[in-house]
Image (cartoon, rainbow, N blue to C red):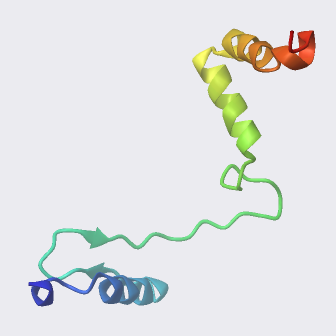
Amino acid sequence: MMEDKPDLAAETLAAVRLASRGQSHRRSGSRRRFAVTDPTYTGSGPDSRDPQLVEEGVADLVNERGWQERVRVASIIGRWPEIAGSQ
């Protein structure tokens, strides 16, 4: 039955309200704890937690995996009609 399950939205809202007051919340019937951590504030400068451009993320992945040559070859093959013509 659905009535026996805790209301996750209400539990989450209660946890957020308590966390905003610096208190922790334990869900009834569960071992899961909503941890309260001190927020870390940063200055106005760039930070590693700032949103990143997809292009930068893909470039990092290509470099980490050593796919540079494969990407160059795939780029040429993908643009072949543009480079050499459709015939």
The residue positioned 56% from the left and 70% from the top of the image is: 39
The residue positioned 64% from the left and 15% from the top of the image is: 67
Q: How many marks?
A: 0
Closer to the camera, 87 or 32? Answer: 87
The percent coordinates of residue 33 (x first, y second) are: 27, 71
The percent coordinates of residue 46 (x first, y second) are: 80, 54
Looking at the picture, does residue 54 appear above or below residue 17? Answer: above
Taking the image as shown, residue 56 lies to the left or right of residue 2, namely right
Looking at the picture, does residue 37 appear above or below residue 11? Answer: above
* Quadrant of the frame with the C terminus: top right
The percent coordinates of residue 48 (x first, y second) are: 68, 49
Taking the image as shown, residue 73 lies to the left or right of residue 23, namely right
Residue that sits furthest to the front in the current view:
87
Looking at the picture, does residue 80 appear above or below residue 40? Answer: above
Closer to the camera, 48 or 80? Answer: 80
Taking the image as shown, residue 76 lies to the left or right of residue 85, namely left
Closer to the camera, 73 or 7? Answer: 73
Closer to the camera, 81 or 3? Answer: 81
The percent coordinates of residue 5 (x first, y second) are: 15, 83
The residue positioned 43% from the left and 90% from the top of the image is: 17
Which of the 4 image quarters holds residue 13? bottom left
Which of the 4 image quarters holds residue 28? bottom left
The residue positioned 82% from the left and 14% from the top of the image is: 80
Looking at the picture, does residue 51 appear above or below residue 1? Answer: above
Which of the 4 image quarters holds residue 79? top right
* Quadrant of the frame with the N terminus: bottom left
